[in-house]
Image: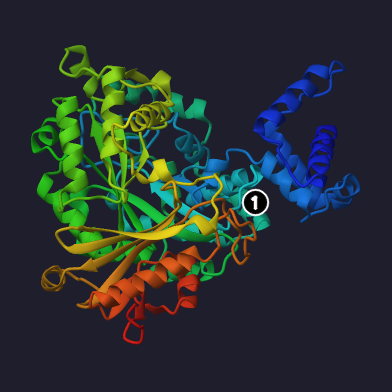
Amino acid sequence: MNETLQKIINAIRAETQEGRCTLDDAWLDKLVRQRNREMHDGTRQVAKKRLLPAYLRLREQQPEVLAAWGAPAGGVVDTAVVRLLRAKPRRTASGVATITVLTRPWPCAGDCVFCPSDMRMPKSYLADEPACQRAERCFFDPYMQVAARLRALSDMGHVTDKVELIVLGGTWSDYPRAYQVWFMTELFRALNASNDARSVCTHQRRAFYEECGLTSDPAVLAQQVASLQQQVSEGDVRYAEAWERLYGQSAAWQRAGAVQQASMEQLAEQQRLNENAEHRCVGLVVETRPELVNADHAVFLRQLGCTKVQMGIQTLDARLLERCGRPTDPAQVERAFALLRLFGFKSHIHLMANLPGATPASDAAEFRLLMHDARYIPDEVKLYPCALVESARLTDWYAHGQWVPYAEEDLIALLAADLMEAPAHVRISRMIRDISSTDIIAGNKKTNLRQMVEARVRAAVAAGEGRCQEMRFREIATSQVDRKDLRLETIAYDTTVSRERFLQWVDGEGRLAGFLRLSLPRAEAVVQALQETAFPLGLGQAMIREVHVYGKVAALGQSDTDASAAQHGGLGRALVDEACRQAQAAGYRQVNVISAIGTRAYYRSLGFRDNGLYQVKDLERLPVA
């Protein structure tokens, strides 16, 4: 391993001495393959993903070795080595490190025909999905999941100062509130701990769960649920009934669950510590169903530190919702959109194409409605094509010809049209679930579906058949951007409860380097909310719902001197300043921001003060531009 690292360092030194470094991932692949072909003496093969952890261990434990090789810590060569060896750079290309965690298995009030029922997982999730595998190995313990993910991301060379926590697991709102408070407390506790403390605590927690009688061995767990799983898959037993037998009546799970509770005071203390922690939470996401969104729950989510809500609406067609067993109606979806927007949350919607009874034409029409009707207009969308897995009730429908998956060409054409239909302020974050192709009986199995769709879109744009303004399509990601080429634009659109302003930094090619979502609530909507709900805001108050600057992650507190990097270049501050000017010009007296716990200090530096569930800035003294 050291011999390979020294070859890499020597090559980088030679290039940097000439004022450039053109070495890339393809060069690294070639070097590793050549080295492994040359080893005939039983020497262990080099795995590319192990190079960076080995290099970082040398830097920490034997810095003199690297210095002798010409790669002292913090130097030009050291920086170039880490950049070359970093695995999966897109993991932090959006500006933050994302950590996905799962809640423990729990019964679901719904019984959707398309939803899988894996008894090892929360409803709708499968044990073979990567995040689910990690959660199961950690006994679904939030602290252990965060600790494991931080370690893995660091080993891949990613900066983890700024973390977005995504909490999955069916419907967050269905879990007991005591469990919700504990889960969030432990997420923050893990972010606040040192590496050594996380290691010790993880070992202690694993021992505790094993003492309770639980196991994290996938083979053993599969065997434990096999009988009930077969009954569920065959439709003889519903998920909720099987859950009660496996978990509700389990003495081991009861012993573990007895300690899974915390007070709001304990949560608040961990949140306070996280404001200045080494790993700060800059976004916190939960998922729920529209019919469970109300003002009381919105207040509770803010107390937990939540900034974004994922909602599984699947379709706006009442007929399809009823047919699929979805316990939601379009009026509840409309109400949920309004409340989330007034409370400042980002909305992240799950939409499914190819549901039973849908057609490509009806799916396209529904997507247009979602994108442009003032009752809806989400900020983000997960646009999934319906796929059949064995444990879903859809299996019988498929067997009897009552549901037929779209042909690949029809599906790609539909998704490409949707991508080109999306406004510049909407991000389609995903087009597939991380479901193993071996688990899919019918439907899309292509893991590169998004790439296939984008290739179709690029061909259409090149042929002059339209343009694509969707956010992810335009993100600079790991690409280079020159700040001098950026311009600040504002896109305005209306909803039933607000006038929205989407401020974006774009370059000459329209690539997105940063954005801000400003909400200007309508007075009549605020008055109605104050009369009907526990609404925490008043008249004359605007809301910044999201600020995001793209590019590779820069460590907190450090200026990035690279002119091609967007992070910490003042773009976020400029967005906030412009939002405040626009809010004042529109007649608003104050601007609130739905800040995450780890961004509170940043907004204080911009003149915002803490104000209950939000941070607020007075606008009276600001000059009108």
**x%, y% of residue 97?**
52, 50
Up the image or down, 457 lies above or below 571; here it is above
Q: Position of residue 443 (x, y in %)?
A: 31, 20
Q: Nearer the viewer, residue 315 or 80?
A: 80
Q: Nearer the viewer, residue 418 or 37?
A: 418
Q: Quadrant of residue 363?
A: top left
Location of the N terminus by quadrant is top right
Residue position marked by numbered label 1 in the rendering: 199
Q: Is residue 388 left or right of residue 455?
A: left
The amino acid type of the residue labelled 1 equals Ser
Up the image or down, 236 lies above or below 608; here it is above
Q: Is residue 486 above or below residue 156?
A: below
Colour convention: rainbow
Q: Residues within 10 Å of mark 1 (few under 14, many from 20)?
A: some
**What kind of element bears circle 1?**
helix
Which residue sits at x=59%, y=53%? 564
One can see residue 496 in this view: yes
Residue at screen point 32% across, 80% down: 624
Q: Is residue 206 above or below residue 410?
A: below
Q: What residue sits 76% from the left and 56% below the top? A: 74
Quarter of the image that includes the C terminus: bottom left
In this rendering, would 118 be left or right of 63? left
Question: Residue visible at 80% across and 44% down?
Answer: 18
Can residue 566 be seen from the camera position used here?
no
Residue sitting nearer the eye, 154 or 548: 548
Which is more toward the observer, 620 or 351?
Answer: 620
Question: Where does the image place residue 95, in percent across and percent down from the top left?
Answer: 51, 53
- Report which quarter residue 402 is drawn in: top left
Q: Quadrant of residue 500?
A: bottom left
Residue 233 pos. (x, y %):
29, 22
